[in-house]
Image (cartoon, rainbow, N blue to C red):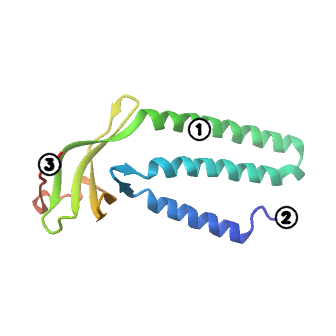
Amino acid sequence: MTIFTLKAILIFALAMILALVLTRLEIYGFSLKIIVNPIAWIGIGVIIFRINEHLRGTGPGIRKSMLGIVFALYVFGSFFLGLRLFMCGETKRGSNYVSVQDQNIHLQCRTYECFLTTGQCKFIQLRTLVKNVQWITTLERHEVDLSKWRMAQTAE
């Protein structure tokens, strides 16, 4: 007895790859990972439920203990991720830079603040694909050479 067909596994894998790609897009300053990550978490819960349906033929003690452990971990993870959703976020800090070679590439310093703590500055490269749609790439500090960037004119 198979749990999932090959077609279902391939569709799920392609959907997960597409979701991971979409997390790097930012539209009008809104990051799509805020939507994609909770949907992926709910998808994991659905898969666990489907697997539990196929375990009905096993012994009731094994099924109940597995369901109890997985359910407890899922509830704990949902609680933790829910807190992170409401209490954590990225903020833009410092100056905005524009590439000397390409006007569509910007460099920003962003910090991730969570539970009243602030992380170190991460350099984010924003490549404008079309107006108000940007592709995000995280850069390491040693990869940034400020001689290839100039200060952007702030219109805000």
Identify the residue shown where x is 71% and y is 50%.
48
Say few, some or many: other residues with alpha carbon within 10 Å of mark 2 (under 14 / 14 to 19 / 20 or more).
few
SS state under label 2 = loop
SS state under label 1 = helix
Report, in whole angstroms, how far the alpha carbon at label 2 lies from the one at label 3: 62 Å
Where is mark 3, residue-wise? Answer: 154
Where is mark 2, residue-wise? Answer: 1
Which image quadrant for residue 117?
Answer: top left
Residue 85: x and y, percent? 47, 38
Q: Is residue 53 left or right of residue 17?
A: right
Report, in whole angstroms, how far the alpha carbon at label 3 lies from the one at label 1: 39 Å
Where is mark 1, residue-wise? Answer: 78
User: In the rendered view of the protein, which quadrant contains the N terminus?
Assistant: bottom right
Q: Reading the chain from its start, which is encountered first: label 2 or label 3?
A: 2
Which residue type does callout 1 highlight? Ser
Which residue type does callout 3 highlight? Thr
Report, in whole angstroms, how far the alpha carbon at label 1 lies from the one at label 2: 31 Å
Q: Nearer the viewer, mark 3 or mark 1?
A: 3
Measured along the vertical axis of the image, is residue 86 above or below residue 38?
A: above
Numbered tag placed on residue 109 in the rendering: none
User: In the rendered view of the protein, which quadrant contains the C terminus?
Assistant: top left
Identify the residue shown where x is 22% and y is 58%.
106
Residue 149: x and y, percent? 13, 59
Q: Reading the chain from its start, which is encountered first: label 1 or label 2?
A: 2
Measured along the vertical axis of the image, is residue 53 above or below residue 61?
A: below
Q: Nearer the viewer, mark 2 or mark 3?
A: 3
Residue 96: x and y, percent? 18, 50
